[in-house]
Image (spheres, rainbow, N blue to C red):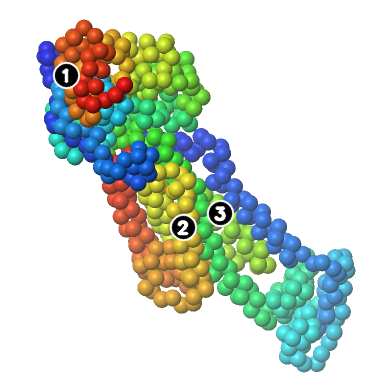
């Protein structure tokens, strides 16, 4: 009952203060808008494009594509080459925009096939691919469209995304934890309201857990907001399709969530311990700033040092970033993710114990 | 209820603090440790108001903080309703209500919310809590501002809220550090009247103050605390010897103090 009352108080404090809710959830929205606008700006064409497209076979559909291009202020020039491979090489070398290959008697027979070969790393070629597939889909005839990028731009984009996203997530998680924990622990200590709770018969361990548990839940909301803002806008920023997020399986998402769920209480309890030690919010902010830099360094190490190995499961924060990267890259490091989450939670329990001891220490709680 | 039932017994309480370099500089002293309370022993009985009278720095607040288990004595012990402050601090906290200006209420919450919260912290049953809230809020006029956030209350209102929150669990012993400090005359009267009412209800009250008139008005027994030691203790009449203020300054000067 006492523990529940403590938990409810923290939730009440947060959910009845519109300013706190706004500061917690706003970063996610801002990130989404910022990255989306940035992505839009980066991927928006500056001037009319000219497409040099090689045709293998023929179809009246090419007129539809040309019309679509003209409607958008662009132009298409259809070319022919005897050798299909030579045409593809021209695309790879950037000398041509794309190759469109129609199956035999494409216009005469139902169920024909059209293949588009393009260069996803080339902005003009990628734009033509989007234009052509949209025009073909709108055409309404029953045929199949197959597309193939002759380079691996999406793979490169995904690799960058996989590396950066965990770093960003951990940074957002840290910011979310900081904004609520500093105020709730260091702020209450500084204002003398924590001492009012300590003079009641509630157990110190309940006070510690009664802070850390709800603060972790609240931080999770903030982290989730930032995560969604980032995850939904990053593909756009990098010129990738949102559908790529569907490429991951259930276990990838589950383990990513588990890693986040384990690192949030760890960071909250770490900040709570530092806040309980500090005499003021200002002092706690300074210490927490240093912790954030340390966490950022660990995340950067994980981002830029390849193949770090399984020993990283033992290092908090680093383990989360490393295995989140692997999960985003499509791998399934199951035991590593589970052990990492376990390590994070065991360290959280240790920090709750430390905070309990600190709450009982008069030099820390009441020292001038 | 037993007559003269000993309800608080302090035995040889000692407390020393380490002075930081900054404190040494401010106080222009070379001493690294400061004895705040030195071998303090006294008893308080059920249904009486016991006053600890002394100047600033005499050890009054330190004594009350030890009794309320916020800090531990370096040596000695005290027993409140038979529970040791050293060995059973949580049990002690169950039987005391402690009010001091150092303990604050969170400005974001309303008196109504805080009363329920601290009631839960002391394990008070919901039905009993509702009855007690109605009674105390009505007694102190808090019902008129029970839904106003604490940060928007005046000093007098805040003091009333702090008072009722500290006794939400109907404790046997009420410990007040400077109960009327900073209050206007009306609120101070409300507080002193309530302390007398608590005494009539058989509660024991230990208060610290440096105000002679407050001791003379309220206390049944008094201990004069100088330099962390009891310089005199007993019934108000016995200690005051007709003039509490004159007796106090005689003792103060006897301890080497200068006015």
**Viewer-nearest residue: A101 or A255:** A255
The residue labelled by disc 2 is A290
The residue labelled by disc 3 is A226
**Viewer-nearest residue: B47 or B123:** B47
Circles 1 and 2: CB distance less than 8 Å?
Answer: no
What residue is drawn where x is 47% and y is 49%?
A: A285
Question: Does dot 3 land on a helix, a strand or a loop?
Answer: helix
In which image quadrant can residue A189 be found?
top left
Residue A34: x, y in percent? 67, 56
What residue is drawn where x is 31% and y is 36%?
A: A198
Up-down relation of residue A174 to residue B219 (above or below): below
Question: Does dot 1 land on a helix, a strand or a loop?
Answer: strand
For marks 3 and 2, the one nearer the N-term is 3
Question: Does dot 2 land on a helix, a strand or a loop?
Answer: helix
The residue labelled by disc 1 is B233
Up-down relation of residue B232 to residue B16 (above or below): above
Q: Are marks 3 and 2 on the same chain?
A: yes
Q: Is residue A190 left or right of residue B59?
A: right
Quadrant of the image containing the C terminus of chain B: top left
The residue positioned farthest toward the top in the image shown: B242
Q: Is residue A359 left or right of residue A284?
A: left
Residue B164: x, y in percent? 35, 20
């Amino acid at each position: 009952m006492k523990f529940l009352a403590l938990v409810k108080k923290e939730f009440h404090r947060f959910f009845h203060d519109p300013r706190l809710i706004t500061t917690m959830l706003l970063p996610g929205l801002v990130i989404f808008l910022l990255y989306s606008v940035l992505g839009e700006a980066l991927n928006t064409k500056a001037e009319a494009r000219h497409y040099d497209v090689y045709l293998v076979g023929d179809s009246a559909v090419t007129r539809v594509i040309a019309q679509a291009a003209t409607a958008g202020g662009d132009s298409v020039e259809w070319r022919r080459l005897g050798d299909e491979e030579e045409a593809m090489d021209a695309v790879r070398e950037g000398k041509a925009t794309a190759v469109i290959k129609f199956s035999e008697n494409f216009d005469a027979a139902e169920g024909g096939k059209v293949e588009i070969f393009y260069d996803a790393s080339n902005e003009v070629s990628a734009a033509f691919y989007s234009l052509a597939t949209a025009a073909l889909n709108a055409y309404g005839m029953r045929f199949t469209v197959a597309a193939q990028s002759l380079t691996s731009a999406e793979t490169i984009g995904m690799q960058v995304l996989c590396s950066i996203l965990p770093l960003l997530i951990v940074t957002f998680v840290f910011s979310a934890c900081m904004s609520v924990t500093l105020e709730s622990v260091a702020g209450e200590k500084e204002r003398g309201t924590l001492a009012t709770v300590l003079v009641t018969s509630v157990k110190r361990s309940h006070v510690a857990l009664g802070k850390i548990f709800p603060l972790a839940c609240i931080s999770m909301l903030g982290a989730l907001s930032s995560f969604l803002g980032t995850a939904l806008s990053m593909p756009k920023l990098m010129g990738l399709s949102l559908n790529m997020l569907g490429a991951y399986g259930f276990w990838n998402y589950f383990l990513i969530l588990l890693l986040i769920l384990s690192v949030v209480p760890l960071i909250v309890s770490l900040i709570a311990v530092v806040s309980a030690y500090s005499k003021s919010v200002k002092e706690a902010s300074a210490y927490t700033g240093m912790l954030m830099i340390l966490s950022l360094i660990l995340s950067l190490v994980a981002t830029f040092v390849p193949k770090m190995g399984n020993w990283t499961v033992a290092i908090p924060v680093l383990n989360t970033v490393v295995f989140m990267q692997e999960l985003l890259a499509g791998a399934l490091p199951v035991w590593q993710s589970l052990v990492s989450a376990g390590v994070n939670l065991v360290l959280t329990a240790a920090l709750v114990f430390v905070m309990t001891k600190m709450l009982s220490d008069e030099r820390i709680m009441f020292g001038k | 209820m037993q007559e003269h039932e000993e309800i608080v017994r302090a035995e040889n309480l000692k407390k020393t603090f380490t002075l930081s370099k900054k404190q040494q500089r401010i106080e222009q002293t070379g001493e690294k440790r400061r004895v705040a309370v030195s071998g303090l022993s006294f008893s308080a009985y059920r249904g009486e108001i016991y006053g600890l009278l002394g100047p600033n720095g005499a050890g009054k607040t330190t004594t009350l903080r030890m009794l309320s288990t916020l800090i531990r004595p370096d040596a000695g012990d005290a027993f409140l309703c038979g529970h040791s402050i050293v060995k059973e601090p949580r049990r002690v906290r169950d039987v005391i209500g402690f009010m001091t200006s150092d303990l604050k209420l969170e400005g974001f919450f309303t008196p109504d919310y805080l009363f329920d919260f601290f009631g839960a912290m002391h394990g008070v049953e919901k039905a009993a809590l509702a009855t007690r809230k109605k009674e105390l809020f009505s007694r102190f006029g808090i019902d008129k501002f029970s839904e106003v956030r604490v940060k928007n209350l005046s000093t007098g209102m805040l003091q009333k809220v702090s008072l009722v929150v500290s006794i939400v669990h109907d404790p046997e012993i009420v410990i007040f550090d400077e109960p009327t400090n900073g209050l206007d005359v009306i609120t101070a009267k409300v507080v002193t009247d309530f302390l007398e009412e608590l005494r009539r209800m058989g509660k024991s009250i230990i208060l610290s103050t440096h105000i002679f008139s407050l001791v003379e008005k309220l206390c049944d027994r008094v201990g004069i605390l100088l330099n962390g030691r009891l310089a005199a203790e007993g019934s108000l009449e016995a200690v005051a010897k007709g003039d509490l203020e004159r007796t106090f300054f005689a003792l103060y000067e006897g301890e080497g103090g200068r006015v």
